[in-house]
Image: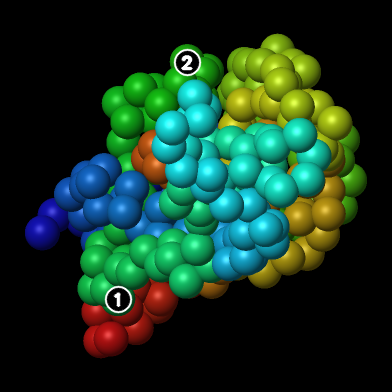
């Protein structure tokens, strides 16, 4: 297999060297496996819910039979003969209520989960896949974008913004800012009033302050390479997120890939 190299840029946006990309970036794109892995992760956050087995049944309602010119529904003995107990009636029970015993967690094998992670990582190195996802990459210096480890030591949001602009990510930050809008529906009053697009992902080897500085930029996420998962690489099950790697993260990824191959 021919090794693929990428330029390494400094914080000023100038190429200062090259780095060999690990073989994980040559993994075939498998959007079907990625989707299964993301849905499996999301299902672990679901909360089981069910109804009281006696809900709607705590009544003395009985049917009065036929021949009285009324429907043969169970009716209360007091309260004007109002229907009760039967499904679909006011104050009645549900026909097939949710049960807390229902299996809502989706399972996925370790091998399939690892394939999904490797495929999602490889998708970040495909310019076509990143563009198809909707990211603005016209001015981005290269895909995948590799930056020196100095990026990990930035401690101010302004410094991170200036670095991203020099790397050609300005149009992407503007796209995320313009996408921010008020959510439609009841979600506005339930703690999720605003919606916005997903922006760049910064992957580092060690946190030298970049996580606290980068999280204030709308749409930007900062994650350690050891904490990578399929959902953050492919939000909404769609692979190809615009990703910025530090050189140390690329080197650390080689060791993690080796451990994964032995598993």
Residue 110 has which mark? 1
Residue at image mark 2 = 138
* Mark with earlier residue (1, 2): 1
Q: Using the rendered view, name the quadrant where residue 158 is placed.
A: top right
Residue 46 has which mark? none
Whether tag 1 and tag 2 are in contact, CB under 8 A, the answer is no
Q: Nearer the viewer, mark 1 or mark 2?
A: 1
Q: Is residue 22 visible?
A: no
Q: Position of residue 215 (x, y in %)?
A: 78, 46
Q: Is residue 60 visible?
A: yes
Q: Position of residue 74 (x, y in %)?
A: 56, 46
Where, quadrant-wise, is the N terminus in this rendering? bottom left
Q: Residue at x 31, y 54 (%)?
A: 36
Q: Position of residue 43 (x, y in %)?
A: 48, 59
Residue at the left extreme of this rendering: 1
Residue 165 vertical placement versus 175 (above, below): below
């Amino acid at each position: 297999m021919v090794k693929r190299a990428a330029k390494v840029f400094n914080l000023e946006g100038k190429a200062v060297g090259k780095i060999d990309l690990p073989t994980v970036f040559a993994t075939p794109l498998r959007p079907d496996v990625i989707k299964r892995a993301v849905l499996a992760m999301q299902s672990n956050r679901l909360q089981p819910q069910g109804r009281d087995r006696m809900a709607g049944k705590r009544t003395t309602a009985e049917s009065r039979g036929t021949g009285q010119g009324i429907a043969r529904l169970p009716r209360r003995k007091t309260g004007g003969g109002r229907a009760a107990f039967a499904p679909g009636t006011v104050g009645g029970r549900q026909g097939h209520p949710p049960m807390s015993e229902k299996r809502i967690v989706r399972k996925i094998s370790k091998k399939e989960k690892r394939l999904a992670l490797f495929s999602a990582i490889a998708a970040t190195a495909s310019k076509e896949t990143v563009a198809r996802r909707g990211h603005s990459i016209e001015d981005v210096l290269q895909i995948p974008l590799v930056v020196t480890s100095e990026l990990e030591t930035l401690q101010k949001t302004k410094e991170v913004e200036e670095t991203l602009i020099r790397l050609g990510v300005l149009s992407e930050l503007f796209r995320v800012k313009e996408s921010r809008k008020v959510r439609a529906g009841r979600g506005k009053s339930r703690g999720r009033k605003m919606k916005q697009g997903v922006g760049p992902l910064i992957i580092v080897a060690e946190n030298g302050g970049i996580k606290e500085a980068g999280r204030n930029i709308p749409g930007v996420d900062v994650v350690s390479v050891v904490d990578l998962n399929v959902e953050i690489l492919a939000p909404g099950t769609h692979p190809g997120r615009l990703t910025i790697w530090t050189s140390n993260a690329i080197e650390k990824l080689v060791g993690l890939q080796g451990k994964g191959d032995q598993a």
